[in-house]
Image (tube, helix red, strand yellow):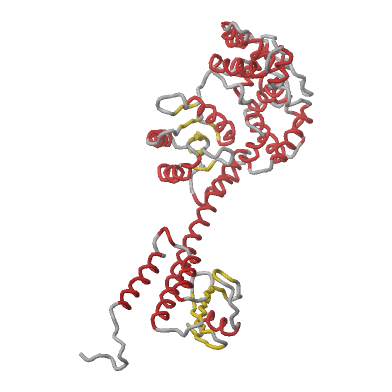
Amino acid sequence: MTGRTDGIRRTPTAAGEQRSWARELLDHLRPGGRDVRRVLDWLAATARAEVSLQDADGTLVAGSGLTLDATLVADLCSGRIASAAWEGEGRHLRLVRIAHPTRTCVLAVSREAPYDRHTSDVVTHSAQVIELLLTAHETTEAGHRLQRATSDLRLAILQLLMVEDTVAARRVAAGLWPGLLDADTACVYVVECEPGRRELLLEECLDTTREDALVVRCPAVDGHLIVVSPREAISDALRVLVGRHADTFLGGSVRQSLARTATAYAQAVSALAVARFRADKTAVYAERTHPERLMDPAALRVWSARVLRPLDALAHHTRAELLATTRLGLEFTAVNTAKILGVSRNTVRARMERVETMLGVDFDDVTARAVVHLALHTQINLQDARTGIAADGHTPGLAHLLAGPALGAWARELLGRLDLDSRNVRRTVRTWIAAGGNAERAAQSLGVHAQTVREHVRSAEPVLERQLLAAGTDLYEVALAHLAVGDLERPRLSGE
């Protein structure tokens, strides 16, 4: 072989350089480096040039803002030409068409030195990588949009169930999960994990339950997943799931009608508190003796109907909305109730204030909350009790309901457990309830420190087997027990 006529001997360095820049460019396709902006930065440094990526409207997607000829950009974006080159005013410009699913872009590379073969190859292959990245990004974004839309639908269905709109919930669910809500009853489960692991657990939960459950990220608690399912087998599947993960717990409700999804959710949350102390990390809401089961059922239904009668004049939808919001609002904070229902906290407060006004009660009074809570949860089964007269011809009041011997015996046994504590915890709990659950006001009445009140109330929880500091069903049962034994004054209701 003879040497080159220009007297310059080429060494393998050029080939090595080509392999080097090609490897660097391919690195941008690895999972950890898929960023169009980084590719443009790399191209600018490698080609010693200014680099711009613009769409057909001239909007800068990435890189520097080069001024380009609008007609030339239009020709490239329309597909009339695939690339173009221009030089002048001491600059050398290359334009390459970049096509991807939603919009066509133009890659512009401007440098002072003329383009040699090496730099031209770098630009051409960079354009191919950018097109791949844009297409992959668009596909990924489409997948994320679909996931978000599906997640939003699941949440919307749950929120419809929470306000007892089962017809609309079934209609929405039928399109994506046919038959899921065809049953009249279902169980609600709450899975608890570390907030940072919720997305991973969500995917596993969806795979485990498949089309047999509605799985929703809890809008109120970052580490919770809410699962609604009419299928019996889901309970076992969720237990297995929780067993595979450390620091993961499961609380479940008893079977409820779909209209009582909010009640079932509260039961699942209550069971979750028990699950945290069990070896298998799971618990189902205990069917313990509840005070309403110790009352005359006919009299209870009639009394509940009469208490809630002021709401009967409202339109059906408005009445159902107010009742559902109040049920949740009595179980949880206004903020969490708002998140669960997908409304603002001001909306929750406004609805509950409206119910307060119509029923003539003050929800700052724990006993009033307990009594309305009793009426609301009895109201669901009120189809046969609109007359306001019991089977024996009497018109029962709250005093009549609380005076039953079975309820009195239950209340004395429950509160009597506190008498074994020499610190007079029973008096503290009674005073704390009378003070609206406010430790500072109770402390002033008792002449002790507020922290002492909190410690006494907290120590009463395992003895009573009920959560008190977290307002809800457990607290209201203890309040009803105090009313039944006469330790607290009965609240006044306009319907009484």
List the single residue furthest toward the front: 7
List the single residue furthest toward the bottom: 5
Relative image position of residue 147 (x, y in whole percent): 50, 53
Relative image position of residue 375 (x, y in whole percent): 67, 25
Left or right of residue 199, residue 435 in this image: right
Q: Nearer the viewer, residue 408 or 66?
A: 66
Q: Is residue 396 visible?
A: no
Q: Nearer the viewer, residue 435 or 120?
A: 120
Q: Nearer the viewer, residue 11 or 165?
A: 11
Residue name at image x 60 percent, y 42 percent: 159
Relative image position of residue 384 (x, y in whole percent): 65, 27
Left or right of residue 177, residue 322 in this image: right
Where the C terminus falls, by quadrant?
A: top right
Q: Nearer the viewer, residue 294 or 325?
A: 325
* Vertical position of residue 183 compared to residue 397: above or below: below
* Vertical position of residue 456 compared to residue 58: above or below: above
* Vertical position of residue 4 compared to residue 13: above or below: below
Where the N terminus falls, by quadrant?
A: bottom left
Relative image position of residue 264 (x, y in whole percent): 55, 31
